[in-house]
Amino acid sequence: MNTTLFKKEMKSNWVLLIIFMAVLSMYAVMIVMMFDPKMGDSLRMMAESMPQIFAAFGMLNVGVTLLDFVSSYLYGMLFIAFPAVYIIILANRLVVKYVDNGSMAYLLAVPEKRRKIVTTQGIFLVASLAVMVLYITCLILGTEQILFPGELDTAAFIRVNVGLLGLLVFLAGVCFCASCLFNESKTSTGIGTAVVVYAVLVQMISRVGDKFDYLKYATPLTLFDVDGLSAGDGKAWLMCSVLYAVGIMLMLVGIGRFSRRNLPL
């Protein structure tokens, strides 16, 4: 990759990353602080009073452990939706925005192959997601050690976050590929947003009741099996591997296409 370009993107996008990490920090700390095994019955009563709403957001079964609690309230929706918005914005900034505003001509004027330039952008996107996931993992583990030492199954929690990164890599692959294929930001952003919204909405509907359970096979978010990963289930690891593989493949498709197509420079 081009290290100069990588550093340039770091300087240009670090504020965006900090903003989203701050939002995730607020939710992460707040949810961990809310944990109280004695509140389990109260939360279950609330869930039973509005089962469809709680189920749609993946909060129907809060469990009795801190891992169950965190998984339900954070990894069911919040830690998917907010990073997805970050991915849509950053993927647009890294490629198609340069093409749309004419700045790509300056990037391609350097003595580097086009493939190397766009590969650097893809690596930066994945690296920033890895930093985000690593940060929230350490934050929750640190908060747990202060408030509830020994309550969280660290190994299981790390497995869940490895799976979360796989899901984010998949979403990044979709948005980055779109950013490489089109010349206008609105088209690329529209496609990335449509895919993310579709995946989230279908998953929410599939959780509402047995009548719509079959819809879980129509969204890639089903491949992120939080319960399976926390239990170390082999099937969950396989589905997680699929997310990583498809995400990387989509990025490679976008890089390959961008390297060969004519650009309106």
Image: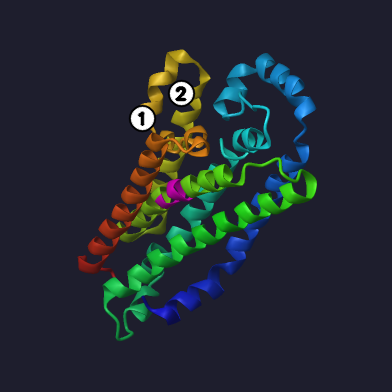
Measure how far apart labels 2 and 1 are at the Cα level.
9 Å
Q: Position of residue 230 (x, y in %)?
A: 53, 38
Counting other residues with Cα less than 10 Å from the Cα at mark 2, is it few (<14), some (14-19), or many (20 or more)? many
- Indicate the secondary structure of the residue bearing disc 2: helix
- Indicate the secondary structure of the residue bearing disc 1: helix
Displayed quadrant of residue 118:
bottom left
Residue carrying label 1: 218
Question: Which quarter of the image is occupied by the N terminus?
Answer: bottom left
Marks counted in the figure total: 2
Bounds of the magenta span?
165-169
Do the CB atoms of the residues marked 2 and 1 lie less than 8 Å apart? yes
Q: In the image, which disc is placed on residue 206?
A: 2
Residue at (52, 43) in percent of width and height: 160
Nearest to the observer: residue 148 or residue 13:
148
Indicate which disc, 2 or 1, sits on the residue closer to the N terminus: 2
Q: Which amino acid does the dot numbered 2 rest on?
A: Ser
On whether residue 198 falls in the magenta region, the answer is: no
Question: Which quarter of the image is occupied by the C terminus?
Answer: bottom left
Q: Is residue 17 left or right of residue 121?
A: right
Residue that protrudes farthest toward the bottom in the picture: 111
Counting other residues with Cα less than 10 Å from the Cα at mark 1, is it few (<14), some (14-19), or many (20 or more)? few
Q: Is residue 224 left or right of residue 61?
A: left
Residue at (67, 20) in percent of width and height: 47
From this view, report whether residue 19 is shown above or below residue 48. Answer: below
Residue at (43, 59) in percent of width and height: 91
Residue at (28, 74) in percent of width and height: 114
Q: Colour scheme in the image?
A: rainbow
On whether residue 167 falls in the magenta region, the answer is: yes
Nearest to the observer: residue 157 or residue 178:
157
From this view, report whether residue 210 is shown above or below residue 240. Answer: above
From this view, report whether residue 227 is shown above or below residue 147. Answer: above
